[in-house]
Amino acid sequence: MTAPARLLWLVDSLGAGGAEALVVTYAEAVRGKQPFFVACLSGADGVNAQRLQALDVPVIDLRARNLRDVAAFRRLLAAIREHRIELIHAHLTYSSIWSAIASRLTGVPAIASLHVSPRATRTLKDSALHRVATDLRDRLMRAILNRWSRLVVMVSGALRDDYLARGLRAAKIRVVHNGIELDRFRRPREESRARLERELDIPSGVPIVATVAVLRPKKGIEVLLEAAPKVRNALFVIIGDGPLREEWTRLAASLGVADRVRWAGYRKDVDALLAGCDLFVHPSLDDAFPTVLLEAMAAGLPIVASRVGGIPEIVTPGVTGELVPPGDAPALAAAINALLGSADTMRLMRAAAESHASRFSTAAWIERLTAVYRECAA
């Protein structure tokens, strides 16, 4: 199916996250069709590691403590030789650095997929030392990729432009939009709605505004909560967990909307829940290409999202949803009210969203990746 045949995906961890979930999506698609191996620097007990084990995909835990962990790096080199790997495909920053160095030492070609902008990892709360370390790591990654990585995959045109401006060589870059398994999210609306109402104590008939995110900085959940008091007659379902959940729970209480917010926590059954919602909101402050928007559209949900990163490559304003300035709670509330207030608009956008999501199927994504693999092998 791919060229070359013996493929190793190297990822920073196998916990919750969009890039980590793509490992499972790819594994499901190529199961039984090619030798496929996964190695992670750490986090081999994460939720996506469990899903890979259920698929009988070998997961190699490198147990890396940091980028300078020589013993862990030697374990990576040993795995490449033991499994006769013909191509390394790395995901995220640390893995991209290690894969390029491993390629230099073993002669096995490597490509790297970058999923986030360096901006997305920085917050105002970061210390000066942390910012310096982040900048140095990013410079190191770009220098190593320019020198030793065969190709670099960007998940969106916006991310490509970002890294071009930072000095990554244009000749190495290929843009490959992520894909999803569409049928997983095309569920009966009535069944999903009944499940939401039962499990999250939601009154019958109340519009449900949903979002799915790891609850960490830059996800913009605070913007959604600030918009909530201005939204008429709707409940907000926040699916996901993370370090900022407690802080945002307190914010919801201080804004007087605690009774209108349902914190669903981390769920393995997001695909079974989305179809029961009415509208999907993605208030992220920076996002290269959020796969969750594809999932929501496949479930037939109109989108209200921030106009940042690669989101405009997914959402077409006035057709599949609306885009608002990042961090603008009044604009976010106005867009939500406008859509929920027009049944005709919602009906048309539901159909358009589901149709548009078909462009991002797993099959189309793998076809694009295969072309990159073949180019790399050639």
Image (cartoon, helix red, strand yellow):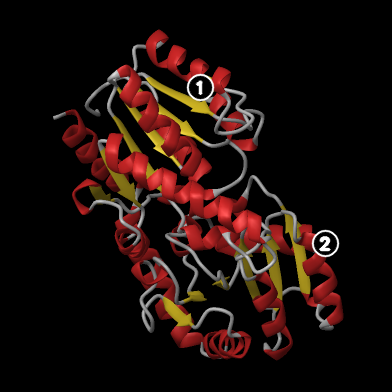
Q: Secondary structure at mark 1?
A: helix
Query: Residue 157 at x, y = what percent?
Result: 30, 62
- Which label belongs to residue 246? 2
The quarter in which the C terminus is drawn is top left
Q: Residue furthest top?
A: 82
| Amino acid on which disc 1 is placed | Phe
Question: Vertically, is 350 above or below 157?
Answer: below
Q: CA distance from mark 2 to mark 1?
A: 36 Å
On the image, the x and y values in percent for residue 230 come to 69, 90
- Relative to 156, is 86 above or below? above
Which residue occupies the extreme left position in the image? Answer: 378
Q: Quadrant of residue 199?
A: bottom right
Sort mark 1 into few (<14), some (14-19) or many (20+) by Cα contacts within 10 Å.
Answer: many
Q: Which residue is mark 1?
A: 73
Residue visible at 33% across and 25% down in the picture: 103
In the image shown, does 344 or 253 lie closer to the viewer?
A: 253
N-terminal label among 2 and 1: 1
The answer to which of 73 and 355 lies nearer the viewer is 73
The reply, left or right, for residue 100 in relation to residue 275 is left
Residue placed at 60% from the left, 66% from the top? Answer: 218
Which residue is depicted at the point 57% across and 50% down? 133
